[in-house]
Image (cartoon, grey):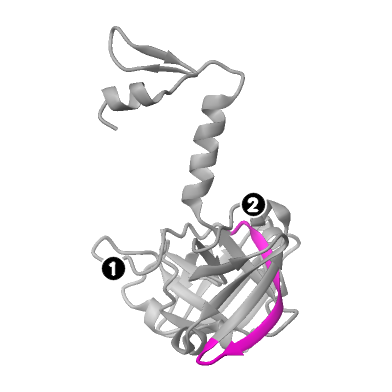
Amino acid sequence: MFTGIIEETGTVEEIKHGRHSAVLTIKASKVLENTKLGDSIAVNGICLTVTNISKDHFCADVMHETLNRSSLASLARGNIVNLERAMSSDGRFGGHIVSGHVDGTGKIIKVRRDDTAIWYTVQTAPEIMHYIVEKGSVTIDGISLTVARVSQNDFSISAIPHTVSATVLKIRREGDIVNLETDIIGKYVEKFIGSVNNENKISITCDSQDTVHNRITEDFLIKYGF
C-alpha cells in the first residue's frame, strides 16, 4: 500500500523491451534506503517489484497488463518519474489509500495558473470518471490529490507550488498522458452494495435466530451495533 506522497523523482536510465513486457532501470537515491530485493516501489503511481538494486539505481519488470493500462509504455531514457516506497507500518498517512494498481490513463487538456496554485484538467474514460467525486481523492502519476471540480468528461485538481516542483507535474503539459487511480474505497462500497442488491440470494448469519437473505435494514444495523 502507498499514500500518494512522492518521496523523490528518479530518472529512467534504461528500458529493455521484450515482446510484451519491459525491464526498467531507474536512477534514484532516497527510495533505495533500506530497500531490498522483492520490495515494492511505485513508479508514476504503478506498484513495481524491485528485481535488482545497487547504490544508485534499481530495476523492475513491467508486465503486459501494466503496459496496456498505463503510460509506462511511452517512457523513454532520461524521463523523470515519481517514486514512492510502500508505506511502512510506523509511517505517517499523509495522503490516502493508494494500491498502486492504476485504473487507466487520462489526458491533460488544460493547465492554468491561479495565483500560487496551478490547475490541471484531465480528460478520461467514463468508467474512470464514474469513481471521481468532487472533494474526493485521486492519484495522478502516483500523486495523492484532491479533486476540485468534476464535469461529465473531465476533472480538475489544484496543486500547490511545492507539489508541482517536487513531482513530475512540473514537466506535465497539455496533451500529456498521465496514470490515474481512483479511490479504492468507493469501488468496494459499490461492489458490496451491488452484491446485496443483485438477484442472487446472499445469506448473512448473525446468530442462531437471525439469517438475512438479501436484506439489510436499518433495524438490522441498529440491532448489531452499527
Please tell me which residue is depicted at 34% across the width and 22% down the height of the picture: 219
- For this orientation, the residue located farthest to the bottom is 115
Q: In front: 33, or 198?
A: 198
Please tell me whether residue 185 belongs to the stretch shown in magenta: no
How far apart marks 2 and 1 lie (CA) works out to 29 Å
Quadrant location, the C terminus:
top left
Query: Counting other residues with Cα less than 10 Å from the Cα at mark 2, is it few (<14), some (14-19), or many (20 or more)?
Result: few
- For this orientation, the residue located farthest to the top is 209
Please tell me whether mark 2 sits on a helix, a strand or a loop.
Answer: loop
1 w.r.t. 176: above or below: above
Total labels: the figure holds: 2
Q: Is residue 77 visible?
A: no
With 193 as the anchor, is 65 left or right in this view? right
Q: Position of residue 154 (x, y in %)?
A: 69, 66
Q: Which residue is mark 2?
A: 130
Q: Quadrant of residue 66?
A: bottom right
Please tell me whether residue 111 belongs to the stretch shown in magenta: yes
Please tell me which residue is depicted at 29% across the width and 27% down the height of the picture: 222
Asked if disc 2 and disc 1 are in contact, CB closer than 8 Å, the reply is no
Please tell me which residue is depicted at 38% across the width and 82% down the height of the picture: 30
Name the dominant secondary structure of the magenta segment: strand
Q: Which-is-in-front pick, marks 2 and 1?
A: 2
Q: Position of residue 58 (x, y in %)?
A: 48, 76
Q: Quadrant of residue 134?
A: bottom right
Q: In front: 95, or 53?
A: 95
Give the residues in magenta: 102-117
Q: Which residue is mark 1?
A: 92
Q: Position of residue 70 (x, y in %)?
A: 66, 64
Q: Mark number for residue 197?
A: none
Q: Amino acid at mark 1?
A: Arg
Q: In front: 211, or 50?
A: 211
67 w.r.t. 31: above or below: above
